[in-house]
Amino acid sequence: MATACILQQNACVHLKSQHLEVSRADPETGRQEVLRSIPLHDLDRLIISEDAQMTSRALARILRENIPISVLGWNDRFLGGFLPATPAQGSFRLNQYRRTLDPEFTLGMARQWVAAKIYNQRRVLQRLAAARRQHRDENSEESENVTGRETAESLGGYIKAVEAVGSIDEVRGLEGASTARYFKAWATFLPHGAAFVRRTTRPPLNAVNACISFASTLLYYEAVAFLHSHGLDPSLGALHTTENRRWSLALDLIEPFRPAVGESLTLDLFSRSILNSKEHFEQREGGVYLNESGRKKFLLQYERRVERQFMSEHAGHRTTLRQQMENGAVRYKGALDAPETLKPFRMN
């Protein structure tokens, strides 16, 4: 699968034969210069910034090719998008509406999503602690990160607690408590200079939070598109309360992927010095956000991570994180009739 990201200011997208041609006016001469040409047959999804323009012919052709388009705002928030027309699936949606009103069903779904999220939080910390131990053994002057190891062990208790509670409010409370403890340990693995005290959103208050939030935005829009494409209503949540102006089910589905994508990728970007606070971020509207250069680097690494193939012990076959995200939508659709088949994504 291929994702094209058009983030240049004042870029314009035209249709030229079987390609999308991206151009921009030269600031000195005013002449349009072609920045890139994107073959439509290689494209699976398109991300554009609110500064980009697109002709109606290009838009129609993209939708005709079943390619979803997502529009990002200046603050990295998902503004909305264009989705290809899908066959009407009224009976599935009626079933989804009925099930969403069933407290026993929604509790079962919420338990599974949160248990999988905490499991993946634990796996992230276990992997980080193991890598730190190996580094310590090779460099004896380094001290072991005990916090990460101990927190990883304690998260197992949260998983058991989630599986035993009798209300969604209790599930949400355990999710919040485990995530707070997880981030406290996770932050100890950040390199010096990468400031992070706690998780902050709307706005993110530092570069680390900006990256985690941007990853969450990308996961969110992908989940919305997958749910739509499989005939489901992304607004009907279980763990996240169904509310107007929010795709609550999409938020439910991405919970297990936050540690595997958002936090793991963010840590990798700072540890490998791919991003740094001075060059790739800017302050706007009381928050900190990726600038154009930072977005490009982030999106490249995001795509590599979600498209990298691996052997999943949980799924039993080779897959990618993006395939597992779509699989989450497919399994939820099946779980409307057989709740035990949900089985959210779990890391190796």
Image (spheres, helix red, strand yellow):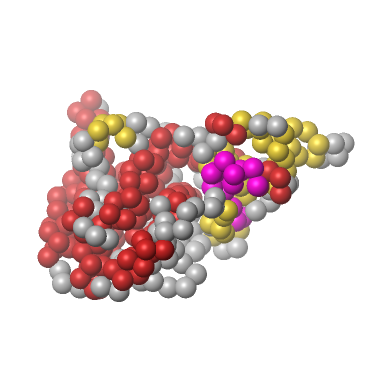
Taking the spot 23% from the left edge, 25% from the top edge, the residue there is 138
Q: Is residue 209 left or right of residue 152?
A: right
Q: Return the residue found at the far right.
A: 29
Quadrant in which the C terminus appears: top left
Image vertical order of residue 67 relative to residue 196, above or below: above
In this picture, which residue range is highlighted in magenta? 60-76
Q: Is residue 286 left or right of residue 35?
A: left
What x and y, as percent, mark residue 39? 61, 30
What x and y, as percent, mark residue 261? 37, 44
Q: Is residue 202 visible?
A: yes
What x and y, as percent, mark residue 246? 46, 67
What x and y, as percent, mark residue 126? 21, 42
Count of numbered circles on the image: 0
Taking the spot 54% from the left edge, 53% from the top edge, the residue there is 85
Q: Is residue 196 magenta?
A: no
Asked which quadrant contains residue 285, the reply is bottom right
Image vertical order of residue 114 relative to residue 105, above or below: above
Q: Return the residue found at the far top.
A: 138
Depth order, front residue of 264/69: 69
Depth order, front residue of 332/259: 332
